[in-house]
Image: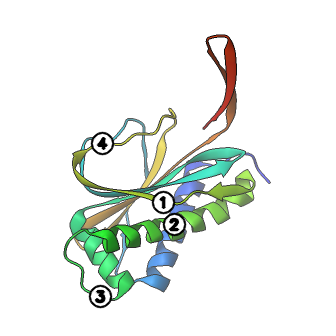
Amino acid sequence: MADQLEHGQLSQIIRRATEEVFTTMLTVALKADEAYFEQAPPANFDGVVSFIGLAGAWAGTGSLCCSSKLACSLSSSFLMTELTVVDEQVLDAIGELTNMIIGNVKNEVEEYLGPMGLSIPTVIYGRNFGARSLGHDAWTVVPFWSGADRLDVKICLAPKERVVHEHGTRSREFILP
């Protein structure tokens, strides 16, 4: 087992995992675009973002980002019902799609980085909001297109480091990604 994962390998794993979920669970055509690194937090966003944590010897976050329109379309296909506004059903469906896609990524990444756990997804919806990871590592982003609508699948992974934070006379140890 290797102790690292190259950007190209990770982007291929993300492509396979996403395409597998879309092929087996949705009837939505999807086309992968060129993967890239995202160093800085993205500009403010309108739409739906779902996050899921990964933990093990390496830790980080996986994310899905899309417009409200695409979130409704994907959720409609997934749940086999017509959904036109972002509501609890759409948020739950996007959370479950995130769980499946990032779960598939986790399963394949474990061959390189060792066993990992997966948190439950957190889904955010709104307009003109931003999100960032407290880590300083770059995200591997693989954009996918469904017609004119874009879905970004993102992963940020880094080895865990131990740091000691002193507060007053007590010290606490935190594990940071």
Q: Is residue 42 left or right of residue 13?
A: left
Do callouts 3 and 1 mark residues in contact (Cβ within 8 Å)?
no
Helix, strand or loop status at disc 4:
loop
For label 3, count other residues whose C-alpha is less than 10 Å away and answer few (under 14), some (14-19) or many (20+). Answer: few
Residue located beneath label 4 in the image: 130
Label 4 vs 2, first from the N-terminus: 2
Residue at the spot of label 1: 121
Q: Are marks 4 and 2 in contact (CB under 8 Å)?
A: no
Image vertical order of residue 149 relative to residue 167, above or below:
below
Q: How many angstroms separate mark 1 from mark 4 (CA)?
A: 17 Å
> Around disc 2, counting alpha carbons within 10 Å, would you say few (fewer than 14), some (14 to 19), or many (20 or more)?
many
Does label 2 or label 3 sit earlier along the sequence? Answer: 3
Give me the C-alpha separation between circle 2 and circle 3: 20 Å
Q: Position of residue 12 (x, y in %)?
A: 54, 62
The CA distance from mark 3 to mark 4 is 30 Å
Is residue 10 depicted above or below 128 in this figure?
below
Mark nearer the viewer, 1 or 4: 1
Q: Earlier in the sequence, mark 1 or mark 2?
A: 2
SS class, disc 1: loop
Q: Give the residue drawn at x 43%, y 66%.
A: 95
